[in-house]
Amino acid sequence: MTVQDIIQKRIALAETRVTKAVFPETTNHYDTLFGGTALQWMDEISFIAATRFSRQRMVTVSSDKIDFNHPVSVGSIVELVATVVHVGNTSLKVQVDMFVESMYEDGCEQAITGTFSFVAIDEHKKPAPVLPEHFIASERAAENKA
Ligand SMILES: CC(C)(COP(=O)(O)OP(=O)(O)OC[C@H]1O[C@@H](n2cnc3c(N)ncnc32)[C@H](O)[C@@H]1OP(=O)(O)O)[C@@H](O)C(=O)NCCC(=O)NCCS
């Protein structure tokens, strides 16, 4: 198994989905989802995906442009999907897409999208490899056993 194969396997393992009801306490005075709440949900789900990929301490280092393409009305359902889209040495990027759907009709559309970068840190809070050596060693050991 190549390192690229291991990365692809961990990307699949790390994909994270969360579904939420848009209740009034999450909205602004226009009765649409408050942008700050959307960003908090996106940062949290992207953190979970980054952590599942690396299984180490991860910190947010930056967020790229966030596009709010469609309003999210109170009383709708949203699904957030977080996918690791780039793996560096000590950092990785997670794309988050938020889809909105009506409670009473089938179908959904993409409402918000953005990318968040995370860095793996060691016990001294210094950057550490996002794909630790022991992942590679254990995958290769399992392959040799098979
Ligand atoms: C994250 C942190 C440990 C990085 O330390 P650093 O000394 O700047 O790290 P480096 O310059 O060695 O870069 C480490 C990696 O981060 C990437 N990186 C650094 N700054 C970045 C930024 N603004 N955006 C995207 N990637 C960045 C580098 O490209 C490098 O990636 P690579 O190893 O995959 O090539 C440090 O900036 C930090 O502690 N920041 C605060 C994090 C925080 O408190 N977040 C909020 C709470 S979770």
Image (spheres, grey):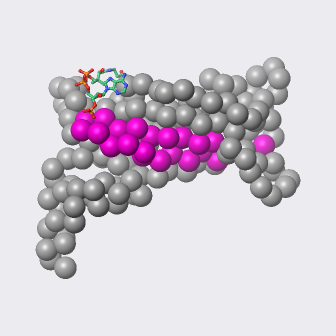
Q: Name the quadrant where ligand 1 sits.
A: top left
Percent position (x, y) of residue 58?
Answer: 33, 35
Residue extending furthest toward the bottom: 146
Residue extending furthest toward the top: 29
Q: Residue at x 73, y 30 (%)?
A: 33
Percent position (x, y) of residue 56?
Answer: 28, 41
Q: Quadrant of residue 40?
A: top right
Q: Quadrant of residue 88?
A: top left
Along the horizontal axis of the image, is 82 left or right of 59?
A: right
Name above or below for residue 84 compared with residue 34: below
Q: How many marks?
A: 0
Percent position (x, y) of residue 53?
Answer: 35, 48
Residue nearest the observer in this picture, 61 or 19: 61
Residue 135 seen in this snapshot: yes
Q: Residue at x 70, y 25 (%)?
A: 34
Magenta region, main secondary structure: strand
Q: Quadrant of residue 37?
A: top right
Along the horizontal axis of the image, is 71 left or right of 121?
A: right
Task: State which quarter of the image contains the N terminus.
Answer: bottom left
Along the horizontal axis of the image, is 83 left or right of 34?
A: left
- Is 138 magenta? The answer is no
Q: Which residues are magenta?
A: 76-98
Residue nearest the observer in this picture, 135 or 86: 86
Task: State which quarter of the image contains the C terminus.
Answer: bottom left
Along the horizontal axis of the image, is 138 left or right of 58?
A: left
Percent position (x, y) of residue 75?
Answer: 81, 40
Q: Residue at x 47, y 47 (%)?
A: 83
Name above or below for residue 60 compared with residue 99: above
